[in-house]
Amino acid sequence: MGFQPAYRKMPIEELQKRACQAVDKLADCTVCAQHCHVNRLEGELGFCRTGRNAVVASYGSHMGEEDVLVGQNGSGTIFFSYCNMSCEFCQNCEISHEGEGREIGPGELADIMVALQETGCHNINLVSPSHFVPQILEALVPAVKKGLNIPLVYNSGGYDDLETLKLLDGIVDIYMPDIKFAEDKKGEKYASAPRYFSIVKEVIKEMHRQVGDLKINNKNIAQRGLLVRHLVLPEDLAGSEQIMQFLASEISPGTYINIMNQYYPAHRARRYPELGRPVHKREHRWAVQKAKEAGLYRIIY
């Protein structure tokens, strides 16, 4: 028998139960790490400015993700609107800050997932899903009934709620969090994410507990595990060395990590002199070197 996604091994009744538990969290919202405690079921808006339904900006086969996700046919990305963080340098601010997109129900979201599978995508890549976990789980129930059978990728900024993540245990195949900052104060200043590093460390530990190191098949396609992204910032504002040491010592030296060099001063970044320029090549090389020195050996850059 070939590879089977985690959620296909779960009884549909358990999947429905998890969806109901997640939806219940919307009534006093603690779905993400912001813990706004608003009643999204009644239309109250918290940090993410979203209510009962998911909001989707776009979806399709994406060839710009990591090679292990893209393969020959692309990663089936679903870009959710709004965000549970507010990065001053966000490169997708039209979607994450301005909310470009439209509300959809669980039936339509399920149809989108199945349609992406039918085009040959290797996975369903949920981009910025942290504030829409209940809606995703609701949609997964009819999607499974319609034959969804490819890995589920949870592509977040790392600012997730631990109890919400536990509802995803046995459902998500690939966790792909960003680790943006190695200091809580930087997370609050540049992303409106209080206690960012304290939270993301526990989040990454839980993600790794659920899925382990990234496993790749003989066609170089990721099937299950943890894939971490880290965007290098000017003047080492992200604290790259500390992040690499954390991953190597507290998660696994086999952590698959993409050290990215595509920072540029987007959105409101030029309000901050320290963020007002692109990253130099030497800064990116330094971050890669620190990853190697920490003992990480599955590095893409």
Image (spheres, rainbow, N blue to C red):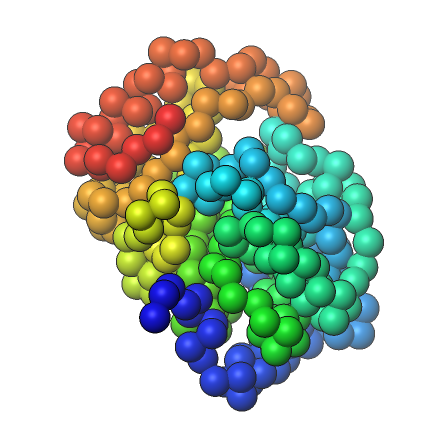
Residue 58 place in picture, x, y as percent:
73, 46
Residue 187, above or below 132: above
Relative image position of residue 220 (x, y in whole percent): 36, 43
| Residue at x 41%, y 68% (from the top left corner) | 4
Image point 73% across, 53% down: which residue? 56
Q: Give the residue at x 56% y 55%.
A: 124
Q: Quadrant of residue 118?
A: bottom right
Asked if 24 appears above or below 300 in the picture, the reply is below
Q: Nearer the viewer, residue 229 or 202?
A: 229
Residue 141 vs 259, above or below: the answer is: below
Quarter in which the C terminus is drawn: top left
User: Can you say which quadrant of the picture contains the N terminus?
Assistant: bottom left
* Residue 286 in view: yes
Can you see residue 51? Answer: no
Q: How many marks?
A: 0
Front residue of this view, candidates 122 and 295:
122
Q: Position of residue 43 (x, y in %)?
A: 81, 68
Q: Residue furthest front?
A: 1
Which residue occupies 48% across, 85% down? Answer: 11
Taking depth in this image into account, of 165 and 146 the one nearest to the observer is 146
Q: Residue 259: percent from the left, percent from the top?
A: 39, 30
Dividing the picture into quadrants, the one containing residue 102 is bottom right
Determine whether 21 is above or below 285 in the image. Answer: below
Q: In this rendering, would 141 be left or right of 231? A: right
